[in-house]
Image (cartoon, rainbow, N blue to C red):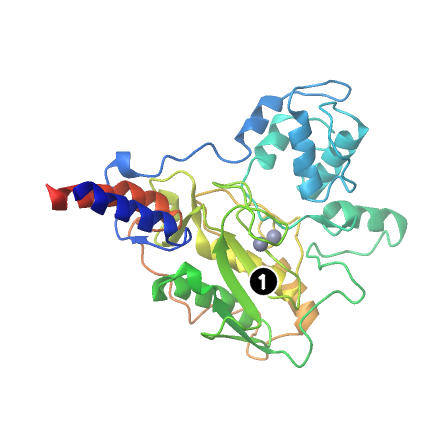
């Protein structure tokens, strides 16, 4: 009987949607043995390529070519990438180094590898061969308008670049019901949207119908749009250009919903609001920026909070939609937003909840039975 009950419980666990949400009110009170056994962050293995130089061959180097292909630095995908450090890889590295303001060496040096392994947005830096970050601007700088100062924000490719039409200034958003988010989880998104609506004449309103302009969901691995997530760290989220309205977050991250993420006991903890503010920029039409302070910079370290729009972000988004008449450019960007006072990063919205449930639930079960 006990075994049957336990088997039923296990079956229920296996059959319940793998993406549900649990909030751990105080994760530090959970014995370390019950914390998820986190595998190595997605790109940690790239660290072994330190010092690889053009002309050499190194076991596994094809993986770093796939990385550069994914983010747009190697445009054409051969059926198989080789492990040779060839011209294609060197050229990708040089462009990447320009985009991230690194010393342009064309080599896998320490500064470059440190940047490559940092968690980041899954959106490409170069789309259809068009780079709008530094490297593209340098080309424009050299060939067309040497004295013209360009901003560092960018848009998705297109002429004109894609944006929400004039008839759409009051957008609705909704959450994929399968995630079962709480009001507290949803409030993170409310705050993130408010940071953008403060500076442009647009509003964002939550609706219950998943038929809204913007549809938000946490998913893991391959989730049907050709852009699979990769587990802990690596790519964190992605969002599609207007007017698609899709914002996807990797449900396998340790998302911190509230509190000071920098003090989280989980090294791979990611601040949800920081990532959501960035992805909303994409939903509205912004591409990546080379300015490290900008929200639209592609990468963010774990246990880091970055939620304030930088001047670069504001200039970019106002170029697309104009200025919010109530925004005077000098007042604090989000006067109505109260930062939640910290409880030491204790609130972790741990979406790989099946893992935690499967660890914790049998314990509860057995204590009930015995
Ligand atoms: Zn991005
Ligand atoms: Zn997706």
Say left or right for 194 vs 132.
left
Q: Secondary structure at mark 1?
A: strand
Can you give x and y, in whole percent of width and height, for residue 341 in the image? Answer: 31, 58
| The CB of the residue at mark 1 lies under 8 Å from ligand 2 | yes
Q: Position of residue 209 (x, y in %)?
A: 48, 74
Q: Is residue 52 above or below residue 68?
A: above
Please name the residue shown 53% across and 46% down the image: 221
Viewer-nearest residue: 308 or 53: 53
Residue toward you, 143 or 118: 118
Q: Can you say which quadrant of the picture contains the C terminus? A: top left
For residue 84, side relative to residue 239 (left or right): right
Front-most of 64 and 5? 5
Corner quadrant of residue 164: bottom right
Q: 10 Å neighbourhood of mark 1: few (<14), some, or many (≥20)?
A: many
Q: Residue at x 59, y 53 (%)?
A: 224
Q: Nearer the viewer, residue 178 or 120?
A: 178
State the residue lying farthest toward the bottom.
Answer: 167
Q: Position of residue 139 (x, y in %)?
A: 83, 47
Residue at figure coordinates x 38%, y 51% from the top left: 15
Relative vertical location of residue 141 with respect to residue 195 in this rendering, above or below:
above
Residue at 76% across / 45% down in the picture? 135
Q: How many marks?
A: 1
| Image quarter of residue 77 | top right
Q: In the image, residue 335 lies at what x, y percent?
A: 44, 70
In this orientation, does residue 226 appear? yes
The N terminus appears in which quarter of the rendering?
top left
Label 1: which residue? Answer: 246
Would residue 160 appear left or right of 316 to someone viewing this image?
A: right
């Amino acid at each position: 009987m006990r075994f049957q009950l336990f088997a039923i419980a296990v079956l229920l666990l296996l059959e319940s949607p793998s993406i549900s949400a649990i909030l751990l009110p105080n994760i530090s009170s959970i014995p370390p043995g019950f914390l998820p056994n986190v595998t190595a962050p997605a790109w940690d293995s790239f660290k072994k390529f330190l010092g690889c130089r053009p002309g050499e061959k190194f076991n596994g180097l094809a993986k770093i070519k796939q990385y550069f292909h994914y983010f747009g630095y190697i445009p054409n995908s051969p059926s198989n990438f080789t492990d040779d450090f060839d011209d294609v890889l060197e050229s990708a590295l040089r462009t990447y180094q320009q985009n991230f303001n690194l010393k342009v060496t064309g080599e896998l040096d320490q500064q470059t590898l440190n940047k490559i392994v940092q968690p980041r947005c899954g959106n490409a830096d170069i789309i259809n061969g068009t780079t709008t970050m530094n490297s593209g601007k340098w080309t424009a700088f050299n060939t067309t308008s040497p004295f013209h100062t360009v901003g560092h924000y960018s848009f998705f490719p297109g002429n004109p670049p894609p944006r929400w039409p004039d008839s759409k200034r009051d957008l609705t958003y909704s959450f994929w019901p399968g995630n079962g988010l709480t009001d507290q989880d949803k409030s993170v998104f409310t705050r993130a949207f408010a940071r953008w609506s403060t500076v442009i004449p647009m509003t964002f309103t939550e609706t219950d119908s998943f038929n809204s302009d913007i549809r938000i969901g946490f998913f893991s691995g391959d989730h049907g749009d050709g852009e699979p997530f990769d587990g802990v760290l690596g790519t964190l989220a992605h969002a599609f250009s207007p007017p698609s309205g899709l914002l996807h977050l990797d449900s396998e991250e340790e998302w911190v919903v509230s509190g000071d993420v920098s003090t989280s006991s989980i090294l791979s903890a990611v601040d949800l609001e920081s990532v959501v503010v960035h992805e909303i920029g994409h939903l509205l039409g912004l591409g990546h920026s080379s300015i490290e302070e900008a929200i639209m910079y592609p990468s963010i370290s774990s246990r880091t909070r970055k939620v304030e729009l930088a001047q670069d972000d504001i200039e970019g988004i106002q170029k697309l939609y104009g200025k919010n008449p109530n925004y005077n450019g000098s007042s604090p960007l989000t006067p109505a937003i109260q930062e939640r006072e910290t409880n030491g990063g204790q609130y972790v919205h741990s979406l790989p909840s099946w893992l935690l449930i499967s660890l914790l639930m049998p314990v509860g079960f057995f204590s009930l039975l015995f």
